[in-house]
Amino acid sequence: MTGLDQLATEIRNAAATAVDRTIVAIAGPPGAGKSTLVDQLLGTLGESPPVAILPMDGFHLDNRILELRGQSARRGAPFTFDAAGFVATMGRVRRDDVEVFVPSFDRSADLARAGAIRIGTEHRIVLAEGNYLLLDEAPWSQIRHMADLSVFIDVEAAVLESRLVRRWLDYGLSAAAARRRAEDNDLVNARLVLDRSSPPHYVYRPATSQ
C-alpha cells in the first residue's frame, strides 16, 4: 500500500524527469474517495509545478438522454458516460502543447457544465479521476496507456457499502429505499470496478470511517 506523502513524492519525481506533462489516473469504485484524494494531493503537491484536474464525472450523459434511453436507473454505469469523449480529451491533454477546456459535474444542479475546467500548457501534472479509468473494457481500456502513473483506491467493502447507502439517505430517501438504490445500481457498479480494473502502479488505502 502507498501512503499520501509517498504517492505525492512519486508524482513529483515523475514530473521532474518527464519531457512532457505527467498524467495520473486515479480510479476506484463509487464512494471510495477519489475526489478527496485529489484534493489531498493538490494540497500536498502545492503549486510547483502547476497541477490541473480532469474529472470523469464531467462526461456524464445528460439526464434527458438517459431517460430517452431508459437508462436512468443505471446512472453511473459505464455506458451512461461519454467514454469516447473522455478518451479523446485524454488524448488532447496528453499532447501538452494546447490549452484544453474540460467539463465538470455540478452535483448541486445534477448536471455537467461544459468548459468549466481549464488545462493550460503550464500545467505539468494532470490528476485524472473517475470510477472507470482502469476498467479493462473498451474504450476505457485505452486510458491506462495514456497515463504515466495509475492509482487504485482500496476501501473495505463494509465501509464502501455504508457510504453508498448514506449518499441516498442524504438525498432524503428512507432507509429501505436508500439501501435498494445502492444495491440495485451503486454496488453493481462498484463490483464491476473491483472485478474488471487493470492492475495499477500504486494501491492507496485511505484512513476510513463510517
Image (tube, rainbow, N blue to C red):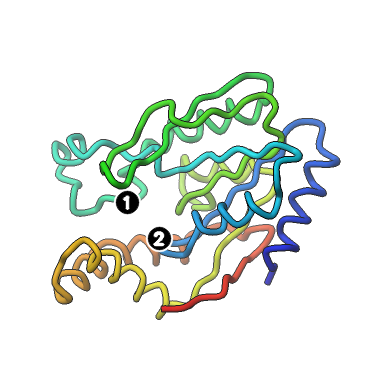
Name the quadrant containing residue 120.
top right
Separation of marks 1 and 2 at Cα, in angstroms: 9 Å
87 above or below 79? above
Considering every residue shown, the one lying at the far right of the view is: 17
* Percent coordinates x, y for residue 181 in the rendering: 21, 65
Residue bearing the label numbered 2? 30
On screen, residue 33 above or below 156:
above
Rendered location of residue 14, percent (x, y): 79, 46
Q: Quadrant of residue 20?
A: top right
User: Picture quarter containing residue 180?
Assistant: bottom left
Say left or right for 109 vs 95. left
Earlier residue among tags 1 and 2? 2
Q: Classify the position of the N terminus by image quarter.
A: bottom right
The amino acid on which the numbered mark 2 sits, given as a three-letter code, is Pro
Query: How far across and how far down the image is residue 130, in percent?
Result: 47, 50
Q: Amino acid at mark 1?
A: Gly
Residue at 33% across / 36% down in the picture?
112
Please name the residue shown 59% across and 20% down the image.
99
Residue that badge 1 annotates: 76
Disc 1 vs disc 2: Cβ atoms closer than 8 Å?
yes
